Image (spheres, rainbow, N blue to C red):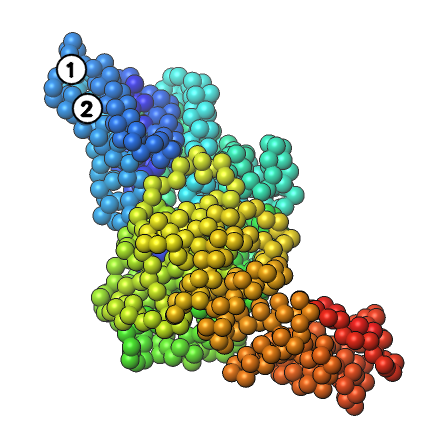
Amino acid sequence: MRSFLVGLYAGFLLAALRAPLGLELLQVVARDPGAAMGYRGAALLAVAVGALIGLAPAAKGYSSTTLLAGVTVGFGVHGTYGDLPAELSVGLAFGVLLVLVIAASHRGGTETRPKKSRLLLAALSAGMGWGLMEYGAPASHAAAVLTAVTGCASVALVGRLAAPQQEQRENDSATGKTQGGRSAALVVSGAGLAILCEGVARPLRQLGAGQASDEFVFALVFLFLATFGALAFGRLFEKTKRVEIGRALLCMASPLAALAATGVLENISSVRGIDRLVRSFGLDLSQRGMASYDAAIAAPALVAPAFVVGTIVALARKPRDLVSLCLGAGAGLVLVPNQLAYDGNSLSVELAAGWAQQHSAALAWMGAGTAALGAGLCAALSSALAPRLRLSLGLAGTLVACAAWFTAGESRGLEFSRPWELRPPEVVLHIDAPEGVLTLERTGAGLVACLNGQALAPPAGESALDGERLRQAWSLMPEGARDPRVLLIGQLNAARTRVLENLGAHSVDRSAAWYRAMAFFEGELGDGGAPAFAGQILSPAKARAKLGAGEYDLVLVPPVPGEVPTTRNLASPPETTVVVWLMAAGGLEELELGREILVSSPKLHELCVGLARGPGLAAARARESFGALRFYAAGDARRNPATLATLRTRVTARERQNRAAMARRLAQAELAPGLASGLALHFEAQQHDSPFDTWQDAIEIDSRAAELFAHAASGRAPDALAVEVIESLARILRGKRRIDAIYQSFEAAATRHSPWPELDLALAQADLELLDPAGALDRLMALLDTWPGSAEAWAMRAEAEQQLGQDEAAVLSLDQALARSPAYHPLERRLAIALVRAGDPRGPAALEEVTREDPEDEELAAYRFGGPWEPVKPGYHPLGTHSHGH
């Protein structure tokens, strides 16, 4: 009972003490690798200190296997604690822990009734355990220290309370032999085992959904397998001599565990391999991120390392041996970032098949070699073994370590495709960096830099909305700010460079966890020229110092998909404007967002929230012009979603639910139904879509939401969100060709705020669909008299003119369209036909040129002969479709 309780509290602490995303402003996009590993190392250190205090050097009734089982239960209970109803969680958790501690305490004592002091201490320990579960991961460094101290104290207190009084008295005078050298050897073994496990876990994370829930499942599977290994194999070694020999042989076998784990990972790194694995469990790749999927891919990769670790823990028959292993494991995790460090100045695409890929698998082999070396040292220092056997095991451990380290240098890195995507990208460069797996990928929309599979900046084909968020953040600076100094916490690319240049940025520094690779990514993602602004790439430490000194006027944090950060540590100087954009798909409804926030809904598919602070916000709130930014009430934070419910939901459905939950939170904060209520109705109406649908077809339109959007857009001065939403709705309804909805939603707003290009184009398309080219031409002429126009607008005008028989005017309109989109074949094709129909002498040559690109085009072939021509087909024909009769 005592060992189980100590393990239970240790499990609480190990689950609680992890570094959340957003420990500070500079870690909103990605964790600092030192902090991430430091927190996990600190958790193991706190467990070690607590066990050292709570368990006597030769504790009676101590069982490391039972303690490991307690860790597994505690870790699992902590992860699923949020599934309990809020009104039951406090009382139930505290009550169960109190009963367990009192029972263990009374069992360890000799009195018939427990003393009041013991009851008070039992209540204190139960309260500490409840606190570790209730408050979850610490949101700051100070909270992390408090969590570590609380966890350490609770482990020690529970161990002492459950100790027999006779043992406590004997402990005071117990001395024992010096075990310094042997303990140090166990520390080395513990460090090696931790590095081995981290080397296996890092590539495994690439196959999950990148959320904390995946980490929870992977860790729980490992603990379960380790406990099973301890129960199955720990009893094979009863005597002290067998324990020493068994520990040495198991640590020397850790390279075999590394071989087995990396072999499994290599097998599932291909699309066929992982598909075959998950289908063997009756699953499919669409279940990525669910508990069953995570467990199915984790178990084969982790089983060998977990069995080795579990059995070695079972052989820690004395508490000090377990303490040494925990200390070593913590130290090993802290050393991981240094082992994966790289020189960003030497990065190049040519390294994609060499040095940059060797770290992933090499880490496991390095850890296995270190564990073997520690085992050899431990055996050599053991007094329970014969001298010759000690020497043999010591030499064997050294040889195995050297062989494992040599294999680490020769091992190949592991690259994982993303088979759950419809079109997996081509990986140009792969770096297993301390901060995660960095990749440069070629997609259909262009090159993109990714961290752990999440795009750090949108590709060139999807950058328009990203640029709009940068412009909105820029508008929050105080009016009249000259030569603003900007800090971009994120990845700079060509599109962001152009936006910042046009805004007038004087100096733009860049910083984030992957700062070593930023210069390389900027070169690959740029347009080949140097930016017009000054600035440099800074490490987070240097950027933190400059930010604290007030050297920046604006801090920009663009959104990155994936896990959302905590929002409690966004401190900055009062004279600095800070804008942090977050995506609701990752789950924002449980975060503290302040009183007011910015809201954006790109394409009505995503929901983004902007957290802003700075001296210019008051002036921004006072603006009421068309398209001005408006701050919306953030609403109250909700309880964290249940872990088990989350793990039973597919990632795409989870993201839809998160967007809808955040939209409901905004709607509940509205005084009257408005734009936020429309967003809530809209996101609640979304359903699973086919990956083969266009983005317009994939979005469901709720009629009540459309009415609220139209009402907001037809008001006196629609704000930026209303403009974004109604224009997105216009593009969606155009793609769906919903004529009645277009007239109902946009007529009033387009009339009141004329010209409004997106709405006018939608209405002109509706006119063409209803076979009213004259009405469409009137709209388009009025629009293009006050707006330079786009290629699409001029092409639509040309189509209306051709349907009215105005072929010469159509030629002029298509010339304007091609001036805005040169060398675009659909426009060149339409112009060639218009020239022929208008009798322009340029027509035959233009027709011949476009025919060479598509010689099987029957419509073009018909125009190679003389007229008369058939009338142009009525209706609306998007660019790329044929629109002329023959």
Q: Quadrant of the C terminus?
A: bottom right
Q: Residue at x 82, y 76 (%)?
A: 870
Q: Which SS class for mark 2?
A: helix
- Marks 1 and 2 close (CB-CB < 8 Å): yes
Residue 313 in picture, x, y percent from top left: 38, 28
Residue 693 in the figure: left or right of residue 102? right
Q: Toward which corner of the image does residue 629 lie, by quadrant?
A: bottom left
Where is mark 2, residue-wise? 122
Q: Quadrant of the N terminus?
A: top left
Dot 1 amino acid type: Pro
Residue 772 in the figure: left or right of residue 348? right
Q: Is residue 43 above or below residue 21?
A: above
Residue farthest toward the right in the current orientation of the protein? 865
Q: Is residue 447 above or below residue 815?
A: above
Residue 114, label in figure? 1
Q: Residue at x 23, y 65 (%)?
A: 573
Q: Toward which corner of the image does residue 848 lie, by quadrant?
A: bottom right
**Is residue 855 among what the camera can see?**
no
- Of pointers 1 and 2, the one earlier in the residue sequence: 1
Residue 458 in picture, x, y percent from top left: 50, 63
Q: Nearer the viewer, residue 770 or 258?
A: 770
Residue 113 in the figure: left or right of residue 814? left
Real-space CA distance between mark 1 and mark 2, rounded to the nearest whole angstrom: 10 Å
Q: Residues within 10 Å of mark 2 (few under 14, many from 20)?
A: many
Q: Which SS class for mark 1?
A: loop
